[in-house]
Amino acid sequence: MIFRRKGKNDDEPATSGGFFGDDDETVEADDAEEAAPVGRSAGPFDSTEVDAESLEAEDRIDLGALVVTGLPGMELRLQVDEASGDVQAVLLVLEDSALELRAFAAPKTSGIWSEVRREIASEATRMGGTASETEGPFGTELVLVVPVEDPEGQIFSQTSRVIGVDGPRWLLRATVLGRAAVEPDAAPPMEQSLRNVVVVRGPEPMAPRESLALRLPAGAQAATEEEA
């Protein structure tokens, strides 16, 4: 489901262009790559590591457990369960690449990415695909190649990068899709968007692996099929 900001007049038609800025602005891939050193010191961040004023900046989008900052021309799409209406995942889309974001609770004492990574790899293998570990800018990640059926019933292979970031009592799982998953030159904008994420874990006790609650952004409404 795609969402757009409401205008001052609710009858105002949706504007063209990305959710986060004008399409005619470009992202310099080399600059994004240089600004993304290995490790979490450059993001993604826990909410306790970011001052409140920065969290409320105009270019940040508050989605509950995740606060995201997109790049110019990027669209924000939310995966919503039709039965419950709950937001299940965040999707940042730029041209023919996408970044899916999900956040989960984790124990205080240790991260869970290594364990989750093995389970994802096993599931990909069970589906008839392959999973290989590689070292990326966020540590050990997975490259999955799995069979997917399109609406016409044709089977093709889909490649994705699954990145896990262990934070204080949370796991942020990011899946890079589309061209950025297979072409290194297209990856930096997705990686920079991941580094810009702020995770709001909250103080409440939660079971490990329980999904952190996401919500619709303020001032957003569902787009019509024509607008989408």
Image (tube, rainbow, N blue to C red):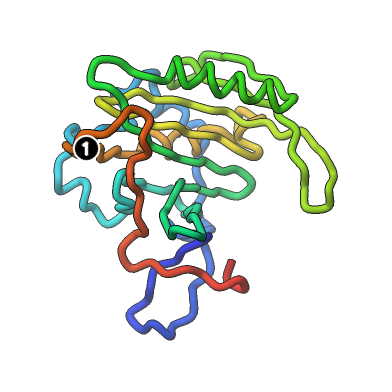
Position in image of residue 221 (x %, y %): 42, 69
Disc 1: CA contacts within 10 A as few (<14), some (14-19) or many (>=20): some
Residue nearer the viewer, 157 or 30: 157
Task: Give the residue displayed 49% in from the left and 38% down from the top.
Answer: 189
Task: Give the residue displayed 53% in from the left and 16% down from the top.
Answer: 118
Per the image, label 1 sits on a secondary structure element best described as: helix
Residue nearer the viewer, 37 or 208: 208
Position in image of residue 172 (x %, y %): 39, 32
Q: For the residue marked with disc 1, what is the amino acid?
A: Ser
Position in image of residue 23 (x %, y %): 53, 58
The answer, for residue 21, to whether it is visible in the render is: no
On the rendered structure, is 182 left or right of 216? Answer: right
* Residue under label 1: 47
The answer, for residue 158, to whether it is visible in the render is: yes
On the rendered structure, is 212 left or right of 115? Answer: left
Residue nearer the viewer, 197 or 95: 197
Q: Is residue 110 above or below residue 52?
A: above
Q: Is residue 166 above or below residue 76?
A: above
Task: Give the residue displayed 37% in from the left and 59% down from the top.
Answer: 216
Viewport quadrant of the C terminus: bottom right
